[in-house]
Amino acid sequence: MSTVLILLPLVLTILFSLVTVPILVWMERRIAALIQDRLGPNRCHINGIRLGGIIQSVADMMKLVFKEEFLPSHIKNKFYYMVAPSIAFMSAFLTFMVIPYADNITIGEQTFHMQALPTDLGVLWFLAFAGLGVYGIILGGWASHNKYAILGSMRATAQVIGYEVAMGLSLVSMLITYGTISLNEMVSYQSQTFFILPAWGIVLQPLAAIIFIVTAFAETNRAPFDAAEGESEIVAGYHTEYGAMKFGLFFVAEYIAMAASGALIVTMFLGGYQLPYLNTNDLINNFELVLWLIIAFAAVTSLLFLRWMKKHNIFVMSGLNEMKVYTTIIIAFTIFAIMVMSYYALGLGHASEVGVMLLQFAIFTVKLFFLHFLFIWIRWTLPRFRYDQTQKLGWNILLPLSLANIFITAIVVVGVNYGS
């Protein structure tokens, strides 16, 4: 059991970063299709099983893995050209290591941290590796010896410098508010209430939340801040000369960076793994009631989803009957889950910290995928900013606002502490 709890945060880090990339690509396509009032990927299948279009994302990933590697003949600095995608990929992946997925769990006399890297320097770790990722882009553009790639890497560098300053300053105001740099302690702080509202970071510091979310888009080169790879201007930017899995690493790094930024936003501004008005002790003390509510929610949600799927899954493919397979799996999984939860809710088992930990994993996952939806929604809603507009927003608007927010926050915190 101890070994499982020690390795669990590392496994979750891999799941939330690497394994979710095909799901994020699928979400990107489906949400884009929804916004543009058209059908998304729905034809690629394995013996009639399409998984709502996820098979298309898996096929694309397999294509990149097995595609023939090539090295342009004009490349002089082959080592830097080859290592650049790995730097971008590893920097994005390592930012996930300090995210707390659930509260610390104590079994016997041993305490287990639900972080892959249990350190109190979580915010500093994130900023360090988020900034390091731009080195992969710089090296990729410079080593490509291509004018469009160099222009893309220069744009990305200027963008990261401009927006990382505002991002760091927005986090300073949060550190003053929370009084700690530990991400887990920040989540614990947000289990309190602020008047009648949950004391989430977005409630306590709405301006800092807006600044951080905007800068997170710019740091990850997500639209509307994707001028570094503007196809209509510079072909594909810094990865113009890359193909096969080298391009795949840049591609995956962008989605991992988006997921890591979303995870930090959830942790610092949306209460992390906590439910509003309920801290970890409340969940443990009322775990039987919580389980009954989850059972009712699972049953109703499964019925509604089956009804929705029957209405919208109208295409008939050769091979297995897709609807029957999905219906059987969902009903079987729902019955199994209800039986397991009923086992605890009826008092036949012991509601423990492990059950609350699993619930907090689910809470964190739901919030994270809501952020993913927000990232994708904004991409397919707003047009790309021009390079000069991007710089003006970062230096002339966000930077002064973040400085003013620090000044106001410091005055309020000092005044509250002095008054108490």
Image: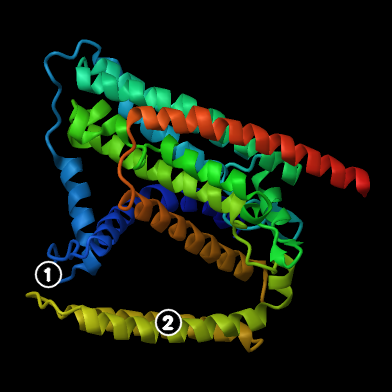
Question: Does residue 330 appear to the left or right of 205 in the view shown?
Answer: left
Camera-side residue: 51 or 376?
Answer: 376
Q: Name the residue under label 1.
A: 47
Q: Which residue is drawn at 61% across and 35% down?
A: 402
Q: Where is residue 109 in the image (x, y as percent from the top left)?
A: 76, 56
Q: Of the residues shown, which amino acid type is indicated by label 1?
A: Asn
Q: Residue at x 43, y 48 (%)?
A: 259
Residue with the most extreme left position: 318
In the displayed structure, 196 sits above or below 2; it is below
Q: Earlier in the sequence, mark 2 or mark 1?
A: 1
Q: Which mark is residue 316?
A: none
Residue with the most extreme bottom position: 346
Camera-side residue: 299 or 10?
Answer: 299
Q: In which quarter of the image is residue 156?
A: top left
In the displayed structure, 272 sits above or below 144; it is below
Camera-side residue: 204 or 307?
Answer: 204
Element assignment for label 1:
loop
Of marks 2 and 1, the one in the foreground? 2
In the displayed structure, 411 sits above or below 141; it is below
Q: Residue 301 carries which label?
A: 2
Q: Which residue is drawn at 54% across and 80% down?
A: 294
Q: Quadrant of residue 343?
A: bottom right
Q: Where is residue 20 in the image (x, y as percent from the top left)?
A: 37, 54
Q: Where is residue 226 in the image (x, y as percent from the top left)?
A: 32, 36
Camera-side residue: 212 or 340?
Answer: 212
Q: Residues within 10 Å of mark 2 (few under 14, many from 20)?
A: few
